[in-house]
Structures are given as C-alpha cells and as structure tokens.
Amino acid sequence: MGRSTARRTATWALALVAAAFSGLALGLEWNLQPAASRIAADIHGLHEYVMILVTVIFVGVFGFMFWACYAHRKSKGHKAEQFHENTTVEIIWTVIPALILIVIAWPATSVLIAQRDTSNPDLTIKVTGFQWKWGYDYIKGEGEGISFVSKLATPRDQIENKAPKGDNYLLEVDNEMVVPVGKKVRVLTTAADVVHAWWIPAFGVKQDAMPGFIRDLHFKAEKTGTFRGQCVELCGKEHGFMPIVVRVVTQDEYSKWVGEHKKAMAAAADDPAKQHTLDELKARGEKVYAANCVACHQASGKGTPPAFPPLDGSKVVNGPKEAEMDVVMNGRPNTAMQPFARQLNDTEIAAVITFTRNNWSNKVGDLVQPAEVKAARK
Amino acid sequence: MSAVVDNHGHAAGHDDHHGYQGGVMRWIMTTNHKDIGTLYLWFSFIMFMAGGGMAMAIRLELFEPGIQFFNPDLFNQFTTMHGLIMVFGAIMPAFVGFANWQIPMMIGAPDMAFARMNNWSFWILPFAASLLIISFFVPGGAPGVGWTMYAPLTVQMGVGMDLTIFAVHLLGMSSIMGSINIITTILNMRAPGMTLMRMPLFVWTWLITAYLLVAAMPVLAGAVTMTLTDRHFGTTFFNAAGGGDPVLYQHIFWFFGHPEVYIIALPAFGVISQVIPAFSRKPLFGYASMVYATSAIAILSFIVWAHHMYTVGMPVSAQLFFMYATTIIAVPTGVKVFNWVATMWKGSLTFETPMLFAIGFLFLFTLGGFTGLVLSLVPVDVQLQDTYYVVAHFHYVMVAGALFSAFAGVYFWLPKWTGRMYDETLGKWHFWLTMIFFNMIFFVQHFLGLAGMPRRIPDYPLMFETWNKISSIGAFGMGLSQVFFLYIVLKAIRTGEKAPEKVWEGADSLEWTHLPTPVPYHTWETPPVLK
C-alpha cells in the first residue's frame, strides 16, 4: 500500500517534470536567436565554445568543493588537516587559467576582426535614432535617395491592455527597412537627440547611435525573411517602444521595391506652394499629430506635465503662430522637444501647427500655410 | 579586560571619549567606531529596503506584457533610483559598517584614526539619501536616465537630476573621508607585532578598497559636475554641437565605474576569507597569494573600463586591448576561488548560517564571474550588451557576491557584537529562501538576454513573458525573505540566547581570541602584544 502510493507519486512527479521540460523546450526562448548571417553564426559558435569550456571548469572546481562539503564534514568526524601554502600548486592554478584564456581569446579575435570589416559594401544606409523612432536614408547603392521614418506600429490600445496583443507586439513598424539577400550592407548610425542603439540579433550586429557622430556596422543576410530587434540604449520615456524591423528580400523583389518606393515617394510629395483650407490642414494635422506628438503631449493635448507640457490651453499654441512655428521647427534645447524641421516636410509642419491651434479648447482660428513654413526654414 | 561599558565617573561636559550620552544624542554625537559601524549597517539596511521596494515595483510592472501599473517615465525613475540607492546607499555603506566595527578590533587599535571625521562621514549619508528620495517629488520627478546617468539624456531631465548630482557629490565625499580614515588607521594604528602580512585578510581587502575609492570617487564627481555645467552653465562637454562628445561621459563614468565594481567586491572577498577558514577549522590556504591576487585585481580594474562600452564604436585595436585586459582579471580571481576551495579541502566543515552564505557566495559569484568572461569577449558582447544577460551577470556579482557576503558577515559577527545568538534554524531558512528566490529571479534572466530582451524597458514582446513571470515571482519571494531577515536580527538582539564566550570554534582573529563576548564599548585601550 505505502509502497504503491510512493510509486504512484513518483510516477506523477516524473510525468510532471517531463511535461514541464517539454513545455519549456517548446515554448520558451533559451538561447541566442537563429543566425541569419555569417557573423551571427560565428558569434553563436564562439559563445557555445566558451560555454562548454566554462561549464567544464565550473563542474570541476565545484566538484572539489562539494566533495569537501560531503566528505570533510565535522559531523562525520573528519579532522582538519593544517596544510597551507604550496608554491607548485599555486603556480599551476595561475598558469593553467592563463593558457585557457589564450585558447579563448584566439577565436574571439578573429571573429571580431571580421565583424568590424565594413569595407566594400554593396549598399550603404544611414540610420538615425530619434526620440522615439528610426530614420532610414539609402545613401549609396541601388535605392539611393530613398528616405523614410520607421515607427512602432503596435496600436496604443494593445499597450494599454484595451485590445488583445498581436503576434509581433512591440516588434512591428510602419515602414520596414528593406535590403537584398546576400549583399553586404553597411549601416551608418547616428542620432538626432540622445544615444540610441541599433540591433538586429539575427545578424549579430549592434551599434550605439551617437548624436553628432557617425559609427558603422555591416551585415550580409544569408536568407530572406523579416528580422526584428529593438533599441537597446536607454533613450528616455519611450525607449521600449522603438523597434527595428529589417525585411530581407531577393534581388528581384528588392529592385521592384526600390522602383515602387520611389514612385510612391514622388506621388506623395507635397507641393509646398499649394494653398490649403483650414479643414484640409486640420485633417492632415491630426494624422501628423498622432504619429509624432501623441506619445508626449497625449491625444487629449494635456501632456504629462511638467516634463511634457500640455498644448491644450497653452500660451504658445494660443499665441502668435511664428512663436509656435519656432518651437516645432527648432525644438526646445535641453528638453525632449526636438527640432522637427528635419523630420517633417513643410506641409506636415503647417498641418500639425494648424491642428493644435484649432483643436481641444484651442480656438485661435488662423492657419499656417506650407509656404510660410518654407519661408521660415533657416 | 572588563566587559562592563566604561561610562563611569566623567563629569557632564567632558567630551564623550569614554562614555556615551543617552538617547538619540548618543548616535548623533558618537565618535565610537562600534556605534558608527552600527549606524552604517542600519542605514544600509533601510536603503536596502527602499531600493528593494523599487525592484519590486519594476518586477511588478514586468510581470506581464503591457503597461499595467507605472507609466514608462516612472518606470525609468525606478530603475535609476534602484541602481543608485543599492550601490551607494545599501552595499557600500554596509561594508563601511563592517570596516568600522572590525578593522580596529582586528588590528588591535582603540578606535579609528579620525574619530570625529568618522562621525561626519556617516552623517552625510542620510542627507544624500534624502535628496535621492526627495527627487521623486519635485517637478519632473527623479531622473529617468539609469544609474549610469549617460549624457546627453541627462540634460533633458528636471530638477530631480540636480538633486541626484548633489547627492552623488555628498556620497562621494563620505566615501573619500571614510577611506582616508581606513587607510590611516590600518597604516598607523596596528598593535605592536601586527605586521602588514599578519593582518586578517578582511583588513587587507579594505586597505586596497580604500585606495580604489580615493582614486575613483573624484572621477565620478568630475563626470557629474560636467553634467551639471552642461545642464545649466552653457558648457558642451558632452554635446557634439559645441565640440564635445557624449562618449567622453561614458569613458569618465566607467573609469570610475569599473573600479567601483571591485570597491564592492573586494570587502566581500575579505568577509568570505574570514568565514571559510573559521568553519573549515583550517588556515586560509594561500594567505600571501590572496593578498597579491587582491592587489592585482585592484590594479587591473583601472585598465578595463571600456568593456562596459564595446558598442560605442571604438577602434578594433581598442576593443582588442580592453578584451585582453579584461580576460586577464580571470587569473587573479581564479586564484582566489581556488584558494577558498583549497581551504575547505580536508578541513573539518560545519555549516552554520555564515558558512552557508559563504558557500552560496562562492558558488554563485563564480557563476557570475564566468558570465563576465563570456561578456568580456567583444563579438559575444555585441549580442549581449544592454540585454537582460548583463542584468543577470551583474546581479550575480552584486547580490550573490556582495549581499550574500554581507549576510555571512552579519551572522558571523552579530553574536560577538551583541553577545546574543541568532536563531540557527531561522538563519538557515533565510539562507535557503534567499538562495532559491535569487536564482529564480536572475538565472532565467540569462535566457531572456540571450533571446534578445533589452534591459530598462517597461514592456516587452510576448515571447519573453514566461521567464519574466518566473523572475517576478522570485523577486517577490526574495523581497519577503529579507523582511524575515530583519525579524531574525531583531529577535537575536532582543531575546536571543546568550552567546558562548568562544562563539565559533575555528575563528582566530584578534576579536575572537583576545576580547570577551560581547565586546565592550571600548576595546584595546592598551594594545595587545603579538608574539
């Protein structure tokens, strides 16, 4: 009776442990993401090699310790020996770790040197970190001249738990960076405000984006697909919400994308000379606001003071339009309010200013035309 | 040696060299190294609870994806203050507390060299800590920049940033004064016959740590002062538009920051080097090589700082230099670990609570050391920099390293200090709960980091959910276990059994062999004579 209970308990426990492990193996992320470039594969190889070495050493050293804990206990009547200091032993355990380090440093050095060789790229793309989005400019190679901003596409409702979360929650953007497979891509990183960091784990590349400086990295994707990463340097309030998505396509698809993207850019280009009505600008401005301003100033226009002041009822927004244009275009130094003159075109700036002046309780009634923004550009 | 507190016969108005005043004035006016040690330890425990509360808040928000409890701004403020409070408010003062209690007793000195400065070193701390806490309640809140305070994010912060900068200045002053005191005491006030190479290893590690502090803290003060002038006085040290460079800040910060790691770790090594021989009933295996290894670690700690910033975009040659220099630290650290294990080998081991924490330290700190070796390799670090792998790594060093050794120290010396034993059963419970919950929090974070979860984010993609849940549950358990620790200590002080005259069979430094239990208020008014 007692015995069978024990056996049943043991069986159940085993089954539970087995289920737990298979669940873990299936459902959880244990290790580095699958490599999609040669460098990433080399890094994973290096990581495994080092892990095996240190695991062996760890088991060895603590084998001694736990054996001592087991066998050299006072409760077992073990008498302490009083030996200490042994020059031979001490030299051995200094020299052997030093040799192991050489064995580790050698492959690390060769991977590192390959990793940093950014010469002769097929395609060069400049990536600019903004609070809190990424700007992409294709500056050399096929697609030269393409330029867009890439922002989080996950709806606010999902983040605030008002809607179910999608599969790519926080890892989806409105405009993906597109590159051809098998081509060496050099990425130049920089930033407009604070330090950000650009990272795609599957490519084994990570580089801080420094405001005012250009750094570089390179990768050559070996398979097509969509690869996702996140900003990895604390850059303020929305640091967790500026993902990076790279779509790797075949050469043909890439050429097609370049053609379509250029056509779309030409079609979408706004004519700064065009005169708009108040309603047109308000409608456009609402979209610009939702894309660029809402994270800080909130949909209600109330902001989250004092770091992010309200626009609803604001003296600046309800004052002369030149003053508001100055803030929007040139930013406020030493605050999160950045200069939008470089990120938005004349029509977008005109629209968003018009929107703020005639929304919520703000009823200024005037409007800003794109031509005025163009004239105000320095 | 009398066990009676020596406060007899001194007229009022006489300075407090021999007795002490009653009530709260005793603690405000005290120049006694034991009182000041007690103040440091209680202060550090209060800060540990405050910083721990913030850690609970962080883990609560990260329990599941989505924003539930704290907006991202407040979340960043918690991560910043958790780091600053734990490093400068909890861990560093805890070891200064041990230094105050133990160094004079261990070297046969009547008190610290500069007794009044000692009082001031401590009493600066509550003001600095208040500034850090008050910053949550000023317009804009506490800075949300991380404990590293990287430029130029710091210029966007509100007045809370200025309070933090001022607090860092005060904390630095306190540390420098404390270090000068420790160096002077050790070099000048040893009992006759207590040569440098006869000092207990705890004293050695503190002597070396004190030099690190004197060298590193002013560098941090410089970094935060430049931040202050960039914010308010139009300088552009870290602003490219004015000819500065944000990377300069990182270099200055980590030139302080890496020695800081050893400022925290070396005294912890010292405590462990007292505890392991005591419970192995066997002398430390290689005393001299431990001293040399500690010195080597201290010197190397000044030439490896840029391994915290491999991804800023430095030349390959610089990356190679910092990678090689960093891996070399594994050699003296290995020497220490081998020495501790060799000390236990063929000893006569018992496993009271201090020894359990020491073994826990040895096991987990070494694990943290190995992940440090993994991180030291630039190509691997490129994948792991600024992920949860780094968070896991440094908590193995800071919590399983420094905190475990502080617990070992408290259980080890509390009976000597108070004359009362803690409850051994409860102590063991505290160890096992802390051990299990600690690993539950941080072991899984290695997986999160490998799988690609960045640190310092208030919300995360769905694939990281399970590990985060496990980690959060561990955190709540760990937090509760430390309240339990408070109960154990209070119980010991109030109603603990009387400690035997010789508390631990194998302990052999001066405070155990030459002083009664509990130690009297004043010790070594005549120095001991060592043969």
Image (cartoon, helix red, strand yellow):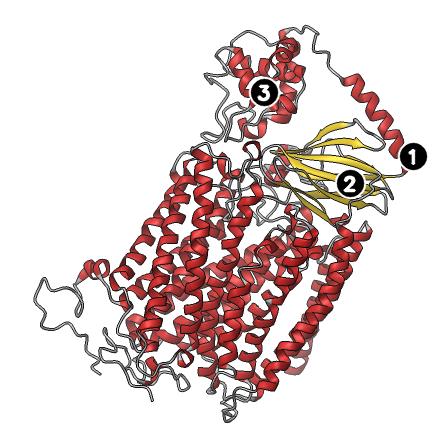
Quick one: B434 or A48, which is closer to the camera? A48
Q: Which residue is mark 3?
A: A329
Q: Are marks 1 and 3 in contact (CB under 8 Å)?
A: no
Query: How far is the residue under mark 3 from the one under mark 2?
Result: 31 Å
Q: Quadrant of the N terminus of chain B?
A: bottom left
Q: Which residue is mark 2?
A: A186
Quick one: A186 or B314, which is closer to the camera? B314
Residue B118 appears in which quarter of the rendering? bottom left
Q: Are marks 1 and 2 in contact (CB under 8 Å)?
A: no
Parent chain of label 3: A
Parent chain of label 1: A
**Residue at 26% from the left image edge and 74% from the top image edge:** B110
Question: Are both tags, 1 and 2, on one chain?
Answer: yes
Q: Which mark is residue A252?
A: 1
Q: Nearer the viewer, mark 1 or mark 2?
A: 2
Q: Is residue A10 above or below residue A27?
A: below
Parent chain of label 2: A
Q: Where does the image place residue B160, in percent across and percent down from the top left? A: 41, 39
